[in-house]
Amino acid sequence: MKERIPYLLEIYQAFKSDDIKSRLKHFDILTNSLFTLTQSLFDNKVQIEHHHAEIENKYFRYGMANHSIKKLLGGNRFFIINKEIDITDLFSAFALTRMQIESFAIMHYLFFDKVDTIEKNFRYEIYKLHGLQKQNKFPVEFEKNKEKKKKIESDIQILVEKIKGYERFQNSNDKQQKVYLNPKHAKLETTKDILVKSGIDSNRINDMWNLYSNHAHGEHISDRQYNYIYKNKKSTLEESMTVISLNTILTSTLCKLISEEFEGVKKKYKELHLGDKVQIEVWSNLKKK
């Protein structure tokens, strides 16, 4: 325990300070751990289940988005009428944070929820079917794309037959079966319900997801916040700290989840630098507060 104290103090001091750079440094450590643990799936030749098929690419894209958030909060430099501007692009960070919350939700739903493997596989088939059906609705003009469309239509039919073979489908009524075969959403559960089940919603992350959706959609709340933050308050510090905290909690939780899911990743987790493990444990535990 004593060897952890310096790292705990460092985290506490960063959390209590108004130093964006210090907080982003800790966020960067967690993002690096996320990439390291994801890479260990490949390095340790970890055997994955059918529903884990997208886990590496989802984790990698999540880590890339973290770096984008870091850059946005670190300050954007550009010229307006020959005058250099250095500004925190807070509203793009809001939109990206909303995306990260949704990414966390779909990953928890597909990979980590406490349901049996057959249920997760069924969810994955519905998830894929939803995506292919949406893609199949795109207009096709060029000949090469017509061949791709035929492949998509073939893949859809294969998925439909697979879904029909699941006991959950066969035990459902006609109305529910139609929902399974023509899903309106990629998930069979709402984002809010998934966040609650994951324990994340105890940190009001669902509330922030709803708020940040206004920025992603360019709605009037985003106008009001812009006027308040940039024109009246003229400071982005408080909102930037909230963005960092939310993304830090999400990232650390994903680190814990993947290390608990696979033995090979658990081994790599144990090999991480003590300071990196303390970061993950402290921030992932905050989701329970």
Image (tube, grey):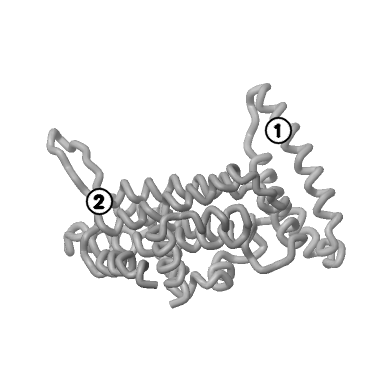
Q: How far apart are marks 2 and 1 (CA)?
A: 42 Å
Residue 155, compared with residue 238, is above or below; it is above
Q: Left or right of 72: which side holds 1?
A: right
From this viewpoint, which residue is outermost toward the left?
83
Q: Which of marks 2 and 1 is nearer the N terminus?
A: 2
Of residues 275 and 238, the one drawn nearer to the viewer in this rendering: 275
Residue 24, compared with residue 282, is above or below; it is above
Residue annotated with mark 2 = 88
* Amino acid type, residue under disc 2 in the picture: Thr
Quadrant assignment, res 136 = top right
Image position, residue 234 (x, y; %): 17, 60
* Amino acid type, residue under disc 1 in the picture: Lys
Of residues 15 and 144, the one drawn nearer to the viewer in this rendering: 15
Rate crowding at label 2 as few (under 14), some (14 to 19) or many (20 or more) other CA atoms within 10 Å: many
Image position, residue 131 (x, y; %): 65, 47
Residue annotated with mark 1 = 149
Q: Do the residues labelled 2 and 1 touch (CB within 8 Å)?
A: no
Q: In which quarter of the image is the N terminus?
A: bottom left
Of residues 112 and 124, the one drawn nearer to the viewer in this rendering: 112
Q: Quadrant of the C terminus?
A: bottom left
Residue at 23 percent across and 61 percent down: it is 237
